[in-house]
Image (cartoon, grey):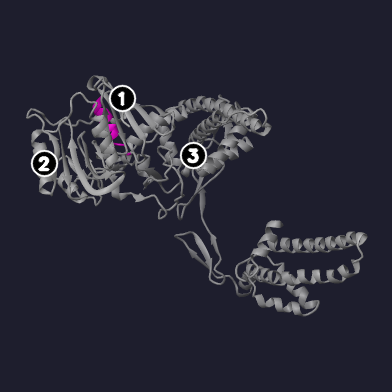
Amino acid sequence: MFKAYGQYWKGYFAFSGKTNLRDYWLAVLAYFLFTFVWMFAGGLAIGLIGKFTDITQELSAYSGYLPIIYIILNLIPMLSMAVRRLNDAGYDWKILLWGLIPVIGQINTLVYLCKGTGAGLAEKCAKEGHLWTYDRAKCLEACSVCAATRSKHNYKKIPDRCVEKCTVCGTEIDRPHQNQETDDPDFVRCKICGQYAVTLHRFTHEEKDALKSAIDIGVKANQNRSLDEVYASCKRQVNSLSPAFGLVELTALAVTAHQVNQALVQNVQKTWLNAGNINQNMAVANSLTVAMNLKTAIDKMAVITEKFKNLTGNENAQAMGNASATKKPLASFASYDESYQGYKKGGVCDVCNKGLDGKKAYAVPNDVFYASPEYREYMKSGPFAAITGHRMTDADIDRMRDQDKSPGSAVCEDCIHMFADISAAPNGSSDTKYYERDNLGTRQDSFGQANVYWMAERFRLKIKPPFTLFAMPSKKAAEKALLKLPFMHRAADTGKLICDRMMTFGVYEIEKNGAPTGEFEAMITGSDLTLAEFNLAEEALERHGGKRKNSAAPDASVQAEKIVLGDASKVAYNTTTVSADGKNTYECYKAPDKACALAFLKTKTVTKPLYYIAVDTPEGSFGRDVNGCYRVADESEMNQSTVTFL
């Protein structure tokens, strides 16, 4: 009622639009209640004041104007709401003029105000006769009089499936499963389609309440953009205790419960208990209780999931088409932004479940999404398995595909390599293009970064790699010169310089006292920089107006290292850690050799400063940050003396 009354005042001058029957009479009821309260409160106030003063007569005289003022204030909103009510009922506003006629006219107006939505159009159709036209292709009938439409499908049940399908247009609707108990109390099975569903018999009431909280938090935080309907299904089941969970719902609930559990534990750890603050103590204790219940529920879900896979592992597996598994050019995928159907701002990547804010995202059709061998391998191992506590099978992913009704999947720039040929030209031609993830070198594009290299990183090395350093007239000239080198390229996606070898390179503006000077430097250095490449670099830099500042030529025996890429799927996720000051994040992996590590790093792109992807191998440690790839020097390659830089 109060909501309807609020809309009544918001629509003070709104004579267009519609107000339904329920909201109209609730607002009228609120009007009379407030009128009564207004008059009662005014009379009560006058009576109380009269006990202590002698101005009661004067107040009574003026109080007579108050109801008149209140009625005048309500004239316009009451009239506009009546017009909107007639619009909703399908009648002309001129009917209100009948209200000027005492009794009969007013009763007539009241009758029309009580008509249901669209009653006027229905009466018109009843008088003139509905003229239905049938569009067979769409299974739709439309009235030529009132423009009303109605579906006219010819549904038939599909054997062995809990769906009904229209024989004309192919539209499918779900019909209820007929679940029966199985030998395992954790599951029921539909006798029509054979699909298993999870029961909740092993969860306590406290654990179910914790799961409800996790679902609410997950939806509000929008942790999984494409699973809003799954969350709703999860909540319905938890609330009604009816068996409805398939593997998709169970996995979504497990991931959400895990994330919420971690957030609650971190919150408890950061909050100091204050003996003098009872409310704070209770809030922390409640968070800890929910987190503990979520942890036990997660453990139980992991057990159920393993049993689920054993039950269904070979029953519904479908062959994956080789044609659909072929990667497509990156440019063939639409950007996942406001222009894309189903876009929801602030969502997450459907692969890594990380937020899309600040990242480029692509819309991948579901037939390509679920057919990708790399995606399937990712789901069967790595971080996903670490989060959910189980490894999925191809049959599990096939079931996810069959249940996914969304128009496509959102994939961030870090995961798009699983579905797109990122080395293909955006226009689909055969010309080779390079992208940011192809950068195996370390880029120095600021004076501060270059100083760190020259004054710290390089200084500590026992053997200094060959290099050349030139002062350049402009950034454009420096970049043109470096692009003459066979291993230097410009990234098609970021427009920055990249290197397909493990070298350090850069173009940066010199600063003095923290201020830019308008002067630039260009550098290239690497342990496998050959003499021919060194000479080519110096020649190109000089030709573009550069002046050599310093250099160290390589020995003629130095050979360029051939980059060998191994199997990225052999790289295993280890852990993610954050530095004590909370500034640096390290996403750590393990690989059997350097070739696999480099292949894996080429599938990654880092867009945030102070974020590092590190891969440990028997041949050393390799990593990627916002500047590209790098190799971590071991102790044998470093000077033992330490230098403190201010």
The answer to whether residue 17 is left or right of residue 524 is: right
Residue extending farthest to the front is 513
Q: Quadrant of residue 19?
A: bottom right
> What secondary structure is marked by label 2?
helix
- Disc 3 marks a residue whose amino acid type is Asp
Span highlighted in magenta in the image:
593-605
Q: Quadrant of residue 115?
A: bottom right
Q: Which mark is residue 616?
A: 1
Residue 600 in the magenta stretch? The answer is yes
Q: Residue at x 35, y 41 (%)?
A: 607
- Residue occupied by mark 3: 160
- Residue occupied by mark 2: 538
Q: Magenta: predominant secondary structure element?
A: helix
Residue 374 in view in this figure: yes
Place of residue 292 in the rendered image (x, y in percent of width and height, measured from the top left): 58, 26
- Disc 2 marks a residue whose amino acid type is Glu
For the residues labelled 1 and 2, the Cα–Cα distance comes to: 35 Å
Q: Residue at x 86, y 68 (%)?
A: 59
Q: Are marks 1 and 2 in contact (CB under 8 Å)?
A: no
For marks 1 and 2, give the one nearer the viewer: 2
Placement of 241 over or under 122, stated as above or below: above
